[in-house]
Image (cartoon, coloured by chain):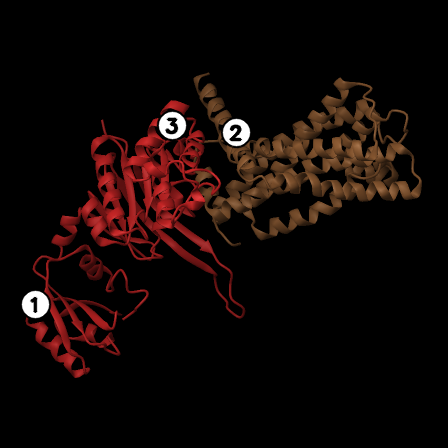
């Protein structure tokens, strides 16, 4: 007998109606998701990797019953999210990174207790779970602190703890470590890994634009861009697609234009951006000989090489290979 | 049966859970005592002095004090329940409420119960202090009828508040403006500071859709049977209030479901700053 999938989407699409600017004609719409087909198995820690605006949060909103799709269907634990949202809600929870929850006048544990009541948890169970989650996120000593006295990071930790309190069957983590310090992020990532491993059948869908996070945590990763799933496989298999390719990262003095690097012979894919007073160039080359042409081009543009590194493929390289730009290129486009 | 019991437990726990921040807030932020007791009394006093200057009968002072007390419930419905979804949306709590397997009415009811404590203190303060300061005497002719009218008035009023609250699932600032617009006209149409009969039959009949209109009128008749300013018979008014209670609660349930679905379709359920 086949096992019910934790998450399944069939040709899922979402189009937003947007306000048309004065003088514009034609349809005023924004395609957030297009023909998304995903299958997430129970017990998987599944990652959705893509840049800002790729459609990750839209997909999560549909799966958590906050938004309906404009086409296709979505199922959570075998239940249609449009037909029977209430049944879906019994099985899920969601944590959005960068968000806090509750009320400033309540203490940390009071806020968490309030949320347990929306899931009908009895007092004893609620207290035990709150206690244990506060220890996980390192807020045990702040249990009696009013939320308005907490720092932003602490509020985020409280919100992270909230997501686990109803012991959901399927948990949606939308950029859960956004804005958190390195040490806290590591603690939360370790807990997420442990939570799935120690509880057979529990599933996590994690969206992130941190490649390392997806690489470290996820059993499988789907790469999403402009509302479409471009690839879906284990991180190792995704990286294997680039086996044989030569991947170089160069740092140079600031360069004015980067567009011409794409046209160089032997350059399979290129992404670059300016950062902290230098320019970072990432190349996927057909073979190593093409590097000479790249270095000549840098010199021709008046740049000086600061560092050169040949490295193993990462998920970012897979993304560049699939999309033709880096995950963080929106802020500093090539 | 098991499902019903589970649903009921979640409903009740949600009510308690959401009432808790309001109740605990009363203890931790005590400035409300000043704003909720002293300031409303000033508004009531102004109308008392107007009636006295005009040489109105002493019952009118009682009408005003009672109206001043009931104002508290209207304000609570409008600002602490109906518009609360606006703030919940802005702070991100609304999305967390909506993904929980609980009733939206339970959340609103929790807000209402939590807020009702402060509101009742305010209403009692206006009633007691107003009576002492302005030497108002109430003679309750029928305690049972009075409590029944008060109960139905509140149920219908909070049902109406839930209908308003549903608008915030879809709208943001637009619904906020609507709430702002509602405050003063309801003061007038419900006859907070004068007997509603003076507005004439048709306007009074229209205003009776606001539960507090008939509630106040019936309570005034029960407290001052000899005054002769009643709009309809108390029995009729109580029946209408009972009907309004049922109608508004059912309408609120449907409106919450309907507007939530529309907002989910249009993608406006969690949009902030709209």
**Residue B89 pos. (x, y %):** 50, 46
Name the chain under label 2.
B
The residue carrying mark 3 is A126
Q: Residues within 10 Å of mark 1 (few under 14, many from 20)?
A: some
**Mark 1 → mark 2, Cα distance in angstroms:** 66 Å
Report whether residue B210 is seen: no
Marks 1 and 3, the one that precedes in the sequence? 3
Q: Secondary structure at mark 1?
A: loop
For the residue carrying disc 2, how many other residues have a C-alpha within 10 Å: few (<14), some (14-19), or many (20+)? many
Question: Could you tell me which residue is drawn at 40 percent across and 48 percent down?
Answer: A99
| Direction from residue B124 to residue A60 in the image, left or right | left
Q: Element at badge 3?
A: helix
Q: Quadrant of the C terminus of chain A?
A: bottom left
How far is the residue under mark 3 from the one under mark 2? 16 Å
Q: Residue A167: x percent and y percent? A: 33, 31
Among all residues in the image, which is located at the extreme front? B133
The foreground one among B123 and B106 is: B123
Q: From the viewer's perspective, is B128 left or right of A128?
A: right
The residue indicated by pointer 2 is B15
Give the numbered dot on residue A287. Answer: 1
Please give the letter of the chain rendered in red.
Answer: A
Q: Chain of mark 1?
A: A
Residue A52 location (% of width, % of height): 34, 57
Q: Residue furthest top?
A: B1
Choose top left, top right, bottom left or bottom right for residue A88: top left
Q: Which residue is located at x 8 percent, y 76 percent?
A: A292
Kind of element beneath mark 2 = helix
**Vertical placement of A55 versus A108: above or below?**
below
Q: Nearer the viewer, mark 3 or mark 2?
A: 3
Residue B218 placement (x, y as % from top left): 80, 28
């Amino acid at each position: 007998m086949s096992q019910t999938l934790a998450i399944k989407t069939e040709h899922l699409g979402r189009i937003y109606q947007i306000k048309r600017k004065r003088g514009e004609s034609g349809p005023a719409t924004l395609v957030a998701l297009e023909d998304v087909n995903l299958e997430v198995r129970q017990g998987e820690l599944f990652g959705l990797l893509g840049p800002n605006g790729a459609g990750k949060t839209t997909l999560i909103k549909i799966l958590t019953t906050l938004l309906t799709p404009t086409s296709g269907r979505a199922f959570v634990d075998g239940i249609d999210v449009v037909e029977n949202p209430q049944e879906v809600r019994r099985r899920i929870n969601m944590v959005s990174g960068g968000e806090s929850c509750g009320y400033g006048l309540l203490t940390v544990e009071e806020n968490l207790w309030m949320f347990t009541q929306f899931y009908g948890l009895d007092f004893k169970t609620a207290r035990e779970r709150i206690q244990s989650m506060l220890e996980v996120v390192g807020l045990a000593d702040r249990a009696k602190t009013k939320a308005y006295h907490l720092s932003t990071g602490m509020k985020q930790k409280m919100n992270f703890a909230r997501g686990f309190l109803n012991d959901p069957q399927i948990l949606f983590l939308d950029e859960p470590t956004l804005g958190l310090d390195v040490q806290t992020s590591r603690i939360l990532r370790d807990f997420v890994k442990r939570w799935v491993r120690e509880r057979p059948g529990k599933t996590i869908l994690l969206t992130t634009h941190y490649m390392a996070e997806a690489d470290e945590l996820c059993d499988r990763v789907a790469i999403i861009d402009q509302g479409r799933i471009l690839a879906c496989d284990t991180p190792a298999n995704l990286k294997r697609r680039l086996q044989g390719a030569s991947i170089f990262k160069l740092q140079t003095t600031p360069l004015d234009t980067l567009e011409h690097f794409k046209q160089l012979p032997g350059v399979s894919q290129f992404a670059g951006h300016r950062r902290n007073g230098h320019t970072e160039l990432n190349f996927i080359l057909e073979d190593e000989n093409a590097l000479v042409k790249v270095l000549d081009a840098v010199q021709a543009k008046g740049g000086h090489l600061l560092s050169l590194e040949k490295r193993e493929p990462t998920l970012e390289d897979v993304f560049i290979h699939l999309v033709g730009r880096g995950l963080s290129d929106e802020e500093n486009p090539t | 049966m098991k499902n019903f019991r589970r649903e009921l437990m979640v409903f009740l726990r949600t009510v308690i859970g959401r009432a808790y921040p309001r109740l605990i807030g009363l203890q931790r932020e005590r400035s409300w005592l000043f704003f909720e007791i002293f300031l409303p009394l000033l508004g009531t006093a102004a109308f008392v002095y107007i009636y006295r200057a005009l040489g109105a009968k002493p019952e009118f002072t009682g009408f005003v004090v009672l109206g001043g007390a009931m104002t508290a419930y209207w304000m609570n419905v409008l600002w602490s329940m109906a518009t609360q979804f606006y703030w919940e949306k802005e702070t991100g709590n609304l999305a967390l409420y909506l993904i929980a397997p609980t009733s939206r009415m339970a959340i609103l009811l929790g807000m209402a119960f939590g807020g009702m404590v402060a509101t009742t203190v305010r209403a009692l303060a206006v009633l007691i202090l107003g009576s002492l300061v302005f030497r108002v005497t109430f003679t309750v002719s029928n305690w049972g009828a009075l409590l029944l009218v008060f109960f139905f008035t509140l149920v219908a009023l909070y049902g109406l508040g839930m209908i308003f609250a549903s608008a915030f699932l879809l709208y943001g600032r637009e619904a906020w403006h609507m709430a702002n617009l509602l405050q003063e006209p309801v003061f007038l149409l419900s006859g907070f500071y004068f007997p509603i009969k003076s507005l004439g039959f048709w306007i009074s009949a229209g205003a009776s859709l606001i539960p507090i209109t008939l509630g106040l009128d019936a309570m005034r008749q029960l407290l001052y049977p000899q005054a002769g300013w009643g709009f309809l018979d108390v029995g009729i008014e109580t029946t209408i209030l009972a009907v309004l209670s049922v109608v508004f609660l059912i309408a609120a349930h449907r409106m919450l479901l309907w507007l939530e679905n529309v907002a989910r379709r249009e993608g406006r359920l969690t949009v902030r700053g709209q």
